[in-house]
Amino acid sequence: MPLLQTRDVTVRFGGVTALESVSLSAEAGVVTGLIGPNGAGKTTLFNVITGLQAPTSGRVLIDDADITDYPVHRRARLGMARTFQRLELFGSLTVRENIQTAAEIHQLGRREHTDVGRLTDSVLDRVGLIRYADAAAHTLPTGLARLTELGRALATTPRLLLLDEPGSGLNSTESEQFGRLLADLATEGVAILLVEHDMDLVMQACAYIHVLDFGLHLTSGAPDEVRADTQVQLAYLGQAEAVSTEIGS
């Protein structure tokens, strides 16, 4: 049974349909990609899953339980965490303080005690930010800021991690390292849903991929299947012949 499911999710803003009957799933221990051209509805779907946007119709399920009407904080208690396309760091705090704050908030109201300092150090090491721990977040280049936001999400020890373009600002070496980190997290049982325009990262990291286009679920499958799909090539490129530019060959 998938950890996350969306069933026939539709979102309309007035006369504009952002999503139309979108159903997909993400399993524990798997990195699942969610790709599509700009404006396809990927971030809108993330907002529905995390409770920032109510669907016009359709359902969101965790462990086969309907959470469509749950507020954001209750979803977080179920082990859901996300990063944002637009960076949302506490700019005046250091990298360490950003991550530690998330860990401390996550502890509120919980019976079990976690050593927040030790957890923070572990996360800093895991995302490769030990040397930047005392840097103010607003001074970081985009790539390091993305890693800080990921670290803040990991400080909540999530079961389901939704990443919205985390590869933005990473160079090729950093992107490869990031892909390996996602694979490591998946081996620990975390379900990862990845929105990303870096197709090299998507093809490296994802075991399964869903494709959106104009708010519709276009297709899904293994990376090689998606890469070879004519509909996907047309959605990205406007012509089936030019497959190498965006989605690889």
Image (spheres, rainbow, N blue to C red):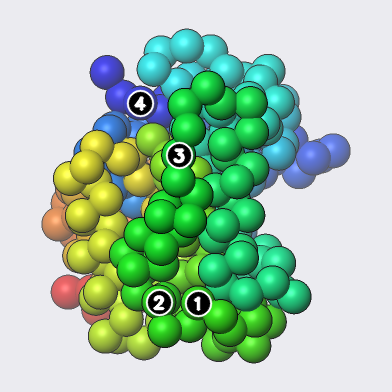
- Front residue of 213/150: it is 150
The answer to which of marks 2 and 4 sits earlier in the sequence is 4
Q: Position of residue 228 (x, y in %)?
A: 19, 59
> Which quadrant of the rendered structure holds the N terminus?
top left
The amino acid type found where label 4 is placed reads Leu
Percent of width and height locating residue 143: 48, 81
Residue underneath mark 4: 3
Decide: is 42 above or below 38: above
Q: Earlier in the sequence, mark 1 or mark 4?
A: 4
Q: For this rendering, which residue is in front, 27 or 181?
A: 181
Q: Earlier in the sequence, mark 4 or mark 3?
A: 4
Q: Can you tell which of label 1 and label 4 is closer to the viewer?
A: 1
Spatial CA span between label 4 and label 3: 25 Å
**Residue designated by label 3:** 114
Label 2 belongs to which residue?
A: 130
Query: Is 147 left, or right, of 3 in this rendering?
Result: right
Q: Nearer the viewer, mark 1 or mark 3?
A: 3
Residue 209 vertical position relative to residue 114 in the rendered view, above or below: below
Instruction: State the separation of the CA atoms marked 1 and 2.
Output: 5 Å
Q: Are marks 1 and 4 in contact (CB under 8 Å)?
A: no
Q: Are marks 2 and 3 in contact (CB under 8 Å)?
A: no
Category of crowding for the residue at label 1, using alpha-carbon neighbours closer than 10 angstroms: few (below 14), some (14–19), many (at least 20): many
